[in-house]
């Protein structure tokens, strides 16, 4: 099995190898930081040229997770687009792909610091959502009431295998806080042993690495 099952705030969750999070009891699929249109934004601002396949690749993986789990509700935890101009530049095929993924299910866009919410693409747009004492928002907050699931920081962790050091995007999980990895194809990351991630998570936190499988390790500090 490519996912990792764990308990969080009294409920069962599955960290998916793709970077998505599956909440079976409510049939909710959560993804964060898709950053669709990053290639277009970089080119528009005169930055480095990247292969123009990131939107298609990200939506393909999202479609695979949706086909596998058939969620009733999809929550996108902010920074779904690299900026609003990138959303407006979405081509017809990618727009139709998103429309197909949304069909027959509740779809929520959480506003992020890169996007104010893709209100033209269907679904509902909110600053946060609360379900069963768990708040879903883009950026983690101090002094949370209940549990919190957020994104924004693009956490990653280092591991050493056969003398080689590798880094992988990861989920960070403790007793009340879960920080999601970025789901988008072209996204960087912040090592979880650096602030503010190191300071946000409790001493018993774990990191769940993504890749071919979802693998838990003690959170590096």
Image (tube, rainbow, N blue to C red):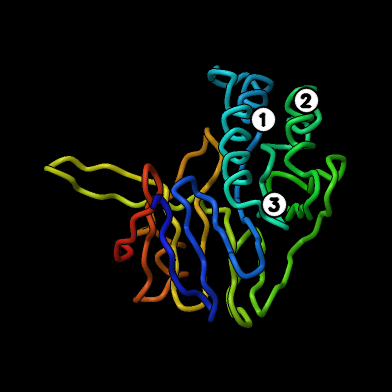
Give the mark nearest the N terminus, 1 or 3: 1
Where does residue 78 sit, x and y in percent of width and height? Answer: 68, 51
Q: CA distance from mark 2 to mark 1?
A: 8 Å
Q: Position of residue 179 (x, y in %)?
A: 51, 61
* Secondary structure of the residue carrying numbered label 2: loop
Q: Which residue is mark 3?
A: 112
**Residue at 73% across / 27% down in the picture?**
94
Residue visible at 52% across and 56% down in the picture: 180
- Say above or below: 182 vs 58: below
- Disc 2/disc 3 C-alpha distance (Å): 18 Å
| Label 2–label 1 contact, CB within 8 A | yes
Give the number of marks.
3
Would you place residue 152 above or below residue 175 in this image? above
Camera-side residue of 108 and 50:
108
Measuring 63% from the left and 56% from the top, which residue is drawn there?
Answer: 29
Q: As drawn, is 64 to the left or to the right of 121? A: left
Marks 1 and 3, how far apart at CA: 15 Å
Determine the secondary structure under disc 3. Answer: loop
Measured as percent of width and height from the top left, residue 199 is found at 43, 69
Q: Are marks 2 and 3 in contact (CB under 8 Å)?
A: no
Q: Are marks 1 and 3 in contact (CB under 8 Å)?
A: no
**Residue pointed to by mark 1:** 37
* Residue linked to disc 2: 89
User: Which callout, 2 or 3, points at the residue further toward the start of the chain?
Assistant: 2
């Amino acid at each position: 099995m490519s996912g990792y099952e764990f308990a969080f705030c009294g409920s069962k969750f599955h960290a998916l190898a793709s970077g998505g999070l599956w909440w079976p009891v409510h049939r909710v699929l959560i993804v964060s930081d898709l950053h669709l249109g990053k290639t277009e934004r970089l080119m528009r601002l005169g930055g480095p040229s990247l292969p123009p396949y990131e939107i298609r690749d990200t939506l393909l993986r999202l479609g695979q997770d949706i086909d596998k789990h058939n969620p009733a509700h999809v929550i996108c935890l902010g920074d779904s687009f690299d900026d609003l101009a990138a959303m407006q530049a979405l081509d017809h095929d990618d727009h139709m792909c998103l429309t197909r993924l949304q069909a027959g299910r509740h779809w929520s866009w959480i506003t992020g610091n890169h996007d104010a919410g893709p209100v033209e693409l269907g679904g509902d747009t909110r600053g946060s959502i609360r379900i069963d004492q768990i708040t879903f928002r883009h950026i983690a907050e101090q002094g949370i009431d209940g549990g919190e699931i957020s994104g924004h920081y693009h956490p990653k962790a280092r591991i050493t295998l056969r003398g080689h050091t590798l880094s992988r995007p990861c989920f960070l999980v403790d007793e009340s806080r879960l920080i999601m990895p970025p789901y988008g194809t072209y996204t960087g990351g912040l090592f979880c042993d650096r602030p503010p991630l190191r300071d946000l998570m409790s001493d018993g936190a774990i990191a769940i690495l993504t890749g071919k499988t979802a693998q838990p390790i003690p959170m590096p500090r």
